[in-house]
Image (cartoon, rainbow, N blue to C red):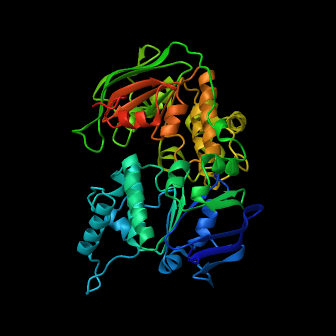
Amino acid sequence: MMAPVLRARDVTKVYGGTHALKGVGFSVAPGRVTALFGENGAGKSTLMKILAGIEQPTTGHVELDGRPVRLRSSKEAADQGISIIHQELSLCPNLSVQDNLFLARELRTAYGSVDRKAQREATAAVLRRLEEDLDPDRLVGDLRLGRQQLVEIARALLQRARVLIMDEPTSALTASEVEVLFRVIGELTSAGVAVVYISHHLDEALDIADDVVVLRDGDLVASARAEEVDLRWIVERMVGRDQDTLFPSRQPVLGREALTIRDLTVADPAVPERLAVDGLSLGVLEGEIVGVYGLMGSGRTELLETLAGRLRPASGEILLAGEPLDEPGIRERIARGVVLVPEDRQRDGLVQTMSVGQNLSLAALGAFVRGLFVSERRERAAVARAITDVTVKAGGAGAAIGSLSGGNQQKVIIGKALLTGPRVLLLDEPSRGVDVGAKADIFELMAAQARQGLAVLFTTSDAEEALHIPDRLLVLARGALVGEFRRGELTREELMRVSDGGTQDGSR
């Protein structure tokens, strides 16, 4: 095995009274993929930020090619050949794709002006490498989350790094896009690039990894060659419990039909002449968890956003407990008892300048108004109950929302939705970018709400979730319902076939 190109030696990081890293030693070698596993808050992102020059270690140091180096900024790290793809996208939505790719490192002509022609050609070339047909001049803010993630990946590829750190690069990608990314990673490692790969999709990370490292509570607790371990080994070292406990077992007690959809048609907001949802009919019972599985472009997000009042249907009916749900607008749907936990928690779910408590109570403020004022006592009591009920790990209601891990931020959004007192709970990819421990908590939250009689409808692009969580699974392809199954009726291979437009027996 070749000598490490990048190494952290006895690195600690202390934030106030919190020890995010406790004497961690970590290294990556040229031409190898090192998969880094750990729950949210285990220290993965902190370690990567230190390696990428974004944070400085409290003690310990970083070595590059065997020599100690002080990386005082991400630019210094990039100049040394270390590039990072962040879990939370760091794009400028008001700029074009090419402007995002070359921000702060624009190509120049001989006269010193920005060489937009060269930038456009380079952008088109790297997008072709990712098999993505995107206009380099299109605004990033107009793109769906998955395509924005591909832009983030393309920006890192343009930097021609010697060490590429990928923090949750596939959390919003389809299965086919993941395959393309893995091919590109193979090309990079063949050229001698060292790759650090962080993902909560444990199976895909293990498929591509050469080496495996596990962090827990700031400590490096295990490392091994990838071929020597399996998923159970990883999960047990990450969370200290058996993998079989991650999916809650339940015997649903079903009531009447809470949500009814008849012949729903929704235009694609990005391409109005295309139908995102095409003549869809379905129902969800009280106490039932219904999953919607589909690849990108299947219409799963558009379906939930239409039910929540964000999009207007072109035709069809939506009924709540048999009564038409005609009121347009998100506020009106919340008042009727239909609330959405959105896919993009940073853009649509949280207000970054507000505290944990303020985010939790935001959608339900009307319930705390007495006369002309908000009753702070009632609001504080409701927030405290919500923090306990959804098991948010935070330094109190006044903690900054940005100080929480991704999993705890997601719990805050779910808690905010539940404080509105919904009858139908909609969740769009609720476990995206969340570790296995927080996933288990979220799944148990969904099951607990169903036991109380809520109708739960959620989307997922994760096959294991689709097979194990819902009482009933609906499969969408190109806006249409192509399959409906009870838990246990479907294998992973059959699910892949059906979602691609085939049938359970493999025919078309």
Closer to us: 101 or 38: 38
Q: Is residue 460 left or right of residue 438?
A: left
Above or below 469: residue 198: below
Residue at position x 37%, y 56% in the image: 180
Q: Is residue 201 visible?
A: no
Q: Is residue 380 left or right of residue 463?
A: right
Q: Is residue 201 left or right of residue 13?
A: left
Q: Is residue 61 visible?
A: yes
Residue at position x 48%, y 45% in the image: 348
From the image, which quarter does the C terminus lie in? top left
**Which residue ends up furthest to the right in the rendered image?**
17
Residue at position x 45%, y 41% in the image: 461
Q: Provide residue 484's location: percent of width, then percent of height.
A: 41, 24
Q: Provide residue 260's location: percent of width, then percent of height.
A: 41, 19
Closer to us: 4 or 37: 4
Which of the 4 quarters of the picture holds residue 503? Answer: top left
